[in-house]
Image (tube, helix red, strand yellow):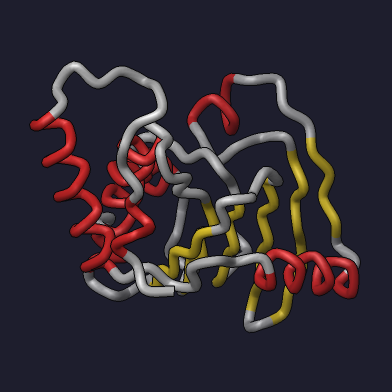
Amino acid sequence: FDDSDSVILTSPFLMTDFSDFLGEISISTIQKIHLITTLKPKSFDQIKKVRSLVSLIEFPDIKDGRVQCQISLNNKLHGKIYIFKKDGDTFSAVVSSANFTDSGLSRNHEWGIEISDKQEIAKLEKSILDSIEFESLSFDEIYSMQESTNDFLTNQPQTEQRDIDLNLTDLLSS
C-alpha cells in the first residue's frame, strides 16, 4: 500500500470494519481503491458484507472523495488477488489464500506469492475485470442494501446464519 496510488482488492470475504484496517496503514498516497467481492443471494453473508461495505464507503478519505472507491461484484469469485499500481503502472500483485479479513490478513496461516512480471499481472487483471457481474455499486445502492438488511433483520430477528430469503443484487442494475 505504501508504494501505491491505486489498488485492486479481490476477495470473496471482507473484514468487518474497513476503518480499523485503513486507519492502521498509511493511505496518504492512495487515490483509488477498487474492491471486487461477492454478494451471493440467499446467503446470510450478505448481511455482514453490507455492513463491511458501509464501513468502507464511510471511511473519511473515501466519503469526502479524496480516495475514489469502486466496488464491483463477482458472485463466482473464490480467488484472493491484490494488485498494486503507481502512476497507472502495475508493479506488484499478490495471489494468496488470504481473504481480505482480519483473520486472513493477521491471524490465519495463509500463503501467497508476489508477482512482479507486468505482462502476467496484466493478464491476471484482465481476467479479474472480465469476470465482474456488477461493475460499480453506487454508494446509494449500498445504503439501500443496508436499509433492506436492517428491514430484513427487524422482520426476522431470529435469523441465524443460514440460507435466507434475501437477494440484494435484485436492487442493482446490471
Q: Residue lying farthest front?
A: 165
**In front: 38, or 123?**
38
Name above or below for residue 113 compared with residue 10.
above
Residue 116 in the image: x percent, y percent?
86, 62
* Viewport quadrant of the N terminus: bottom right
In the figure, is residue 92 to the left or right of 71?
A: right
Name above or below for residue 168 compared with residue 87.
above
In the figure, is residue 150 to the left or right of 96?
A: left
Residue 29 appears anywhere in the view: yes
**In front: 39, or 70?**
39
Count of marks placed on residues: 0
Q: What residue is at 44 percent from the left and 69 percent from the top? A: 70
Q: What residue is at 51 percent from the left and 34 percent from the top? A: 101
Residue 159 in the image: x percent, y percent?
24, 21
**In front: 148, or 69?**
148
Name above or below for residue 99 compared with residue 147.
above
Residue 115 in the image: x percent, y percent?
85, 56
Residue 1 appears anywhere in the view: no
Q: Quadrant of residue 15?
A: top left
Q: What residue is at 31 percent from the left and 46 percent from the top? A: 50
Residue 45 in the image: x percent, y percent?
41, 34
Name above or below for residue 76 compared with residue 142.
above
* Viewport quadrant of the C terminus: bottom left
In the figure, is residue 121 to the left or right of 105?
A: right
**In front: 48, or 154?**
154
Q: What residue is at 63 percent from the left and 20 percent from the top? A: 108
